[in-house]
Amino acid sequence: MTWKAAFPMYNVSAGVRAGYEALFAALLDVLRADGFRDAVELERAPVLPEFWKRPDMLLSQTCGYPYVTRLRGHVGLVATPAYAFPGCEGSDYSSAVVVRANGAIGVLADARGCVAAANDIDSHSGMNALRHAVAPLAHDGRFFGALTWSGSHRASLSLVQTGEADLAAIDCVTLGYLRREEPSSLDGLAILCHSAPAPALPFVTGAAVPQAVRQCLQGALLAPPPELANLMAALSIRAFAHCDDADYARIGALADEARACGYAQLA
């Protein structure tokens, strides 16, 4: 078998993408040293979420919301990165609710009837976290005047900048990388507030990956050798933590809290 690997979640620049590919190359070296001899190919443009369910998927990073809603049983949790960005605490992260600087929205309640942008219906950071944040403010299942599905956090930011949307919830890790790699992409924007914290985006293996391989990868991430630790630091990853299904159940609990407010869908 030729295994596949992909790291599609934070490709905000060529430099960040290269950083994750270098991290994977170092992990593959660890596997090779442990006796792993199978062929592996890196995919740069995987079709999601289908890629995560493929029987030949070796290693990837996924969002916690699809993990909770559709991927358990198809992937195995390996380790969760603890990022060194504002809005992160340990292996938790949050979404920054972004608006135009010096605009009319001073608190979240001011966004009632405004236009929201969200990257994807399966995104925790762009959809689920925002739904949870505004649920207590919603009336009859609605809060926003309109909702635009943008396709990416970068596109959501652009919509807010141009005035086509008034607000978006952006993964704070994406914001951290953008501040470093392309600060002009955040011109004219301000952070209104942060969402409730949740476990960050986990590294996962496919269901067909042998347990010994998963354990080898997990061991390397939890106790990285110096080369791997240096690559992690370049990606602003302080460490990796082991988070289990009980930890990721917190993401489902945020969805349940929104539904309990009568706000089942972001609207």
Image (cartoon, rainbow, N blue to C red):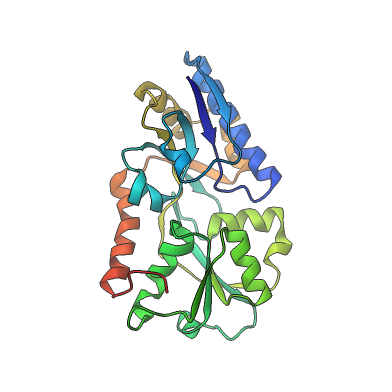
Q: Residue furthest left?
A: 260
Q: Residue at x 32, y 82 (%)?
A: 140
Kindly indicate the quadrant of the structure image that contains residue 215. top left
Q: Nearer the viewer, residue 206 or 64?
A: 206
Q: How many marks?
A: 0
* Residue 226 at least partly seen: no
**What is the quadrant of the C terminus in the image?**
bottom left
Q: Answer whether residue 181 is visible to the viewer in this image.
A: yes
Q: Going 62% across and 62% down the picture, which residue do you hit?
A: 155
Residue lying at 55% horizontally and 74% vertically, measured from the top left: 167
Residue 161 x %, y %: 66, 72
Q: Is 14 located above or below residue 214 in the figure?
A: below
Q: Is residue 109 left or right of residue 19?
A: left
Residue positioned 39% across, 79% down in the render = 142
Residue 199 percent location from the top left of the image: 40, 51
Q: Nearer the viewer, residue 147 or 169?
A: 147
Location of residue 3 in the rendering, given as x and y in whole percent from the top left corner: 50, 25
Q: Nearer the viewer, residue 153 or 176?
A: 153
Q: Give the percent coordinates (x, y) of residue 30.
A: 52, 22
